[in-house]
Image: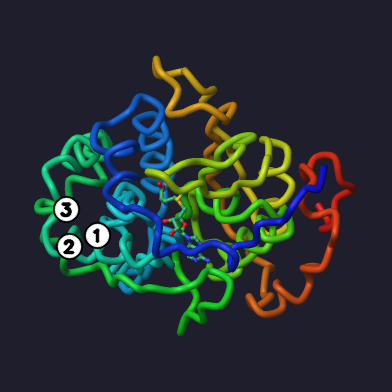
Amino acid sequence: MVNWTRRNCDVNWDEFDAGRYLDHNYRTLRGDDHRFIEAMRDFFADFELPPSAIGVDLGSGTNLYPALAMLPFVQRVTLLDRGSQNVRYLEEQVASYDPSWDPFWKVLLGNPRYAVVTDPRAALRKTADVVQGDIFSFRPHDRYDMGTMFFVAESISNSAAEFETAVARFLGALKPGAPFAAAFMENSKGYDVGDTHFPAVRIGQEDVRQVLSVAAEGLTVHYEPAGSSGDALRAGYDGMILAVGRAKPELSMSSEAWSCALDYSDPSSVRPISKRSPSLPK
Ligand SMILES: C[S@@+](CC[C@H](N)C(=O)[O-])C[C@H]1O[C@@H](n2cnc3c(N)ncnc32)[C@H](O)[C@@H]1O
């Protein structure tokens, strides 16, 4: 059987149905997301960033909780996504987010660092910039002091090379020492949003550690097996992985250099990464 590669550019991301994705994933707060928010919150709360700090969330989709988790620490936060429906949703939510996000903010308030944000709706409006852009080509003016990327690198194509590139782009966009949180679906076979099927790369915890370790340190990995919160989110994945850590202080590679270091033409890129010999140093 032919194993077709479905690259990121082969997908029409404007067909990503923001309303259906939101309804399925974030209308109510799931137990697995709850525990990931707590872990990210307590990790970020240990950092002192400069008052001028800027943050980024790559591939935001219709998920506001990574941006909310950065609010106490940043003067500005960029929410970047490729899909036009997601961008429209983000713009509406930045103007004044729906009450369905209040339970997510309540979890963040479980750490006292978040109490400085007395009006999170107003804070998001004042702080967030929504950008329609492409993780593979966007050129930030400056590198970011903190960042998040949730369920993106492995869920935007079925190419292992593009998974590695997306992670490298994310870490390359951060300043040395910047704290980050990144989440991944484990062994996803792809996912449906409404009637449209979107591709994914099958990756596991070891792949996540390996790819992040190239440019990150102090990694902690949290794991939620599918079904840990009662019902699994959907069929076709084994669990959810959250990694928190810091961009390596000695890292001085630009994102351009990162992408050049990767082999886009690798024909083995549709195979599960853990079965390939590592293409990047550990
Ligand atoms: C599985 S969704 C994850 C959304 C959200 N971060 C979450 O936590 O649920 C993947 C997201 O990546 C976005 N995306 C796909 N390709 C992209 C690209 N090249 N650059 C930026 N975003 C992209 C999609 O539009 C979609 O919103």
> Marks 2 and 3: CB-CB under 8 Å?
no
- Seen at 34% across and 30% down, the residue is 34
Across and down, in percent, residue 68 comes to 28, 51
Is residue 231 positioned above or below 266 on the image?
A: above
> Marks 2 and 1: CB-CB under 8 Å?
yes
Badge 3 element: loop
Is residue 231 positioned above or below 271 on the image?
A: above
| Disc 2/disc 1 C-alpha distance (Å) | 5 Å
Q: Quadrant of the N terminus?
A: top right
Residue toward you, 240 or 54: 240
Which label's residue is closer to the chain start, 2 or 3? 2
Query: Which amino acid type is marked by label 2?
Result: Glu
Query: Which amino acid type is marked by label 3?
Result: Val
- The residue identified by callout 3 is 117
Badge 1 element: helix
Could you say which disc has been placed on residue 92 in the image?
2
| Disc 2/disc 3 C-alpha distance (Å) | 20 Å
Is residue 7 positioned above or below 41 on the image?
A: below
- Seen at 26% across and 49% down, the residue is 19
- The residue identified by callout 1 is 89
Q: Residues within 10 Å of mark 1 (few under 14, many from 20)?
A: some
**Quadrant of residue 84 within the rendered picture:** bottom left
Residue toward you, 111 or 200: 200
Query: Which amino acid type is marked by label 1?
Result: Tyr
Is residue 270 positioned above or below 205 on the image?
A: below
